Image (tube, helix red, strand yellow):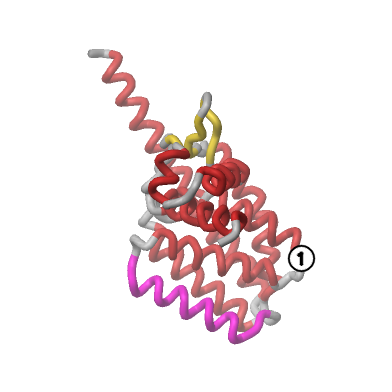
Amino acid sequence: MSRTSLAETAYRELIRMILEGQLKPGDTLQEVKLCEVLGMSRTPVREAIGRIDSDGLAEQKGRFFRVRRITAEEIDEIFFLRLALEPACARNAAGRMDVARLHALEVAVRALLESGPGQDDLQWHVDQDLHLAFAGASGNAPMVRVIAELHRRTCIYDHRVVPERFAEGCAEHLALIEAVRSGDGAGAEALMTAHLTQARDAIVTHLAGADSAATDITERTAGT
């Protein structure tokens, strides 16, 4: 396998580990340890960590990179951009997408819904596939790349830490697919707006709760 292929494999594995909680926000991305886990040399692992950093999912602290803790403000900024782009993509996709492609998306969402939460890597890929399929219907490749980048930057929080959104999100995806299939552009646009808004609010609520819990622990520790 070429070095490029190894680096891509390492990158996908690191994303999977982040999605499944094996690597949590704040965890150090130790090259030596990750090389052992992935069974690879340091070069492809180092390149993969660099991509994780470029995606905004890691940050450098001293000599090491750590999985980033994304703030509520960043979530708002990311979803502001997604809300500016994706509802229009959904409207544009209505009546234009290939019926077989829409059927494949529906089958994937229904299979995911039947299997239930817990398969974080699969959930993320099904979610990404659907959102990028709608974006791709525009034929605007740069916009697809932007949406893919924004989607990656919230992947840590999309499903694992907000499991209450699992069934709701699947139902919203199915409604979107039906609106696009029936050619209801206005409906697809409204559904995408609601879908992204609810996803954003769930993540922000989770982050607020986590920050509050951390503050309580700090205050109790200081008082002892």
Residue under label 1, please give it: 140
Q: Nearer the viewer, residue 197 or 21?
A: 21
**Identity, as a three-letter code, of the amino acid under mark 1:** Asn
Q: Residue at x 56, y 53 (%)?
A: 7
The percent coordinates of residue 187 (x first, y second) are 61, 72
Q: Secondary structure at mark 1?
A: loop
Residue 66 location (% of width, % of height): 48, 35
Tell me which corner region of the image, top left, top right, bottom left or bottom right, holds residue 216: top left
Tell me the chief SS of the magenta region: helix
Residue at the image position 56 percent from the left and 37 percent from the top:
73
Q: How many marks?
A: 1
Residue 94, relative to residue 49: is it above or below?
below
Residue at 59% of width from left, 77% of height from top? 179
Instruction: Answer above or below: position of 22 versus 124.
Output: above
- Does the segment drawn in magenta span residue 106? yes
Q: Does residue 78 sit above or below 101 in this rendering? A: above
- Category of crowding for the residue at label 1, using alpha-carbon neighbours closer than 10 angstroms: few (below 14), some (14–19), many (at least 20): few
- Residue 149 can be seen in this image: yes
On the picture, is 224 further left or further right than 57? Answer: left
Q: Nearer the viewer, residue 23 or 128?
A: 23
**Magenta-colored span:** 97-116
Quarter that holds the N terminus:
bottom right
Point 39% across, 46% down: residue: 36
Vertical order, 104 against 39 (above or below)? below
Residue 97 x %, y %: 66, 80
Rendered location of residue 102, percent (x, y): 57, 80
